[in-house]
Amino acid sequence: MTNPSTSKTSNTVAEVRGLKKCFNGFWAVDGISFDINKGEILGLLGPNGAGKTTTIHMLLGLTTPTEGEIRVFGLDLRSHREEILSRVNFSSSYVSLPYSLTVRENLRVYSRIYAVEEPVKKIEELLKTFEIEDIRDVSTRKLSSGQITRVCLAKALLNDPEVLFLDEPTASLDPYMADKTRGLLKRIKDEKGLSILYTSHNMREMEEMSDRIIFIDRGRIIATGSVKEVVGEFHRESLEEVFLKIAQTGKDSPHAGKYPDPKLT
């Protein structure tokens, strides 16, 4: 299997090399390297505490790496953070919005932050897309978790990002809206060449969404490739079976440390 960390192409929108993060002696992320390609959905998979969210926070510049390099659109994140962040966005089921504002007011605030052109038109378009027109003037504190998730997804698409980081984006959605959201994200990906880094504990969702998978455990990459390749590498029938095997064996897995970190060239 080809290690995607070594296959840099002109379609690469983000490069991660030797990324590490230590918290008080604990290595939450321990030397991972990968690329995100234009127009792909890259699934970042692993048990709780594997380092997924820490990795996303470093890619967003919210957490400073202990070691390693991150380049997005060919730019070093440390010195071009503002420029990079104007072209990306993030959503999670676990992010809070200002509760005292209505849905529309929240989206107006973020449209100003993102310098959105024609914000009223864009907001109305996204309210319709996520079927939340009827709650546009409802205070955020009165919304259900599923409604808040849809508002957060609308917020994340306000600036028409080129790269979207999604941390369990459908965790609070009912099956209908989760399916609709997955379809919407895939349509936007195809139409606009959107690149998505996607995490979820729903293995069927990961199989449906991901063009490629990076499996991490204890902060290290232990498997990478297409869903079919990863499943085959572990001699299992599904991604869920792979997940259970990794969760059970952890760092004792024969695949641990299989993907060393290439130097950034």
Image: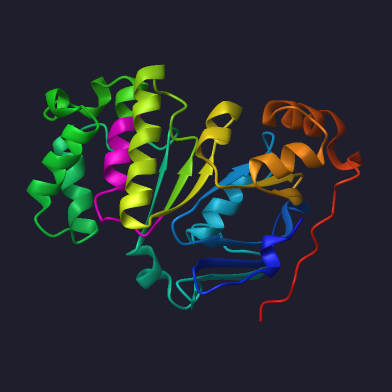
Up-down relation of residue 7 to residue 179 (above or below): below
* Whole-percent x, y for residue 258 in the image: 84, 55
* Whole-percent x, y for residue 35 in the image: 59, 63
Find out whether residue 161 is within the magenta segment.
yes
Is the image coloured rainbow, by chain, by secondary structure, or in one colour? rainbow
State the image quarter where residue 91 is shown.
top left
Q: Is residue 201 visible?
A: yes
| Residue pictured at 60% horizontal, 53% vertical | 55
| Residue pictured at 85% horizontal, 48% vertical | 256
**How many numbered discs?**
0
Find out whether residue 181 is within the magenta segment.
no
Q: Quadrant of the N terminus?
A: bottom right
| Residue pictured at 67% horizontal, 34% vertical | 48
* Whole-percent x, y for residue 6 in the image: 70, 69
State the image quarter where residue 129 is shown.
top left
State the image quarter where residue 187 is shown.
top left
- Choose between 130 and 47: the one closer to the eye: 130
* Whole-percent x, y for residue 66 in the image: 67, 65
Is 42 on the left-hand or right-hand side of 160?
right
Q: Quadrant of the C terminus?
A: bottom right
- Choose between 25 and 62: the one closer to the eye: 62
**Magenta residues (range):** 149-163
Up-down relation of residue 53 to residue 257 (above or below): above
Is 234 on the left-hand or right-hand side of 41?
right
| Residue pictured at 54% horizontal, 42% vertical | 210
Q: Is residue 101 visible?
A: no
Query: Residue reaching furthest bottom?
Result: 265
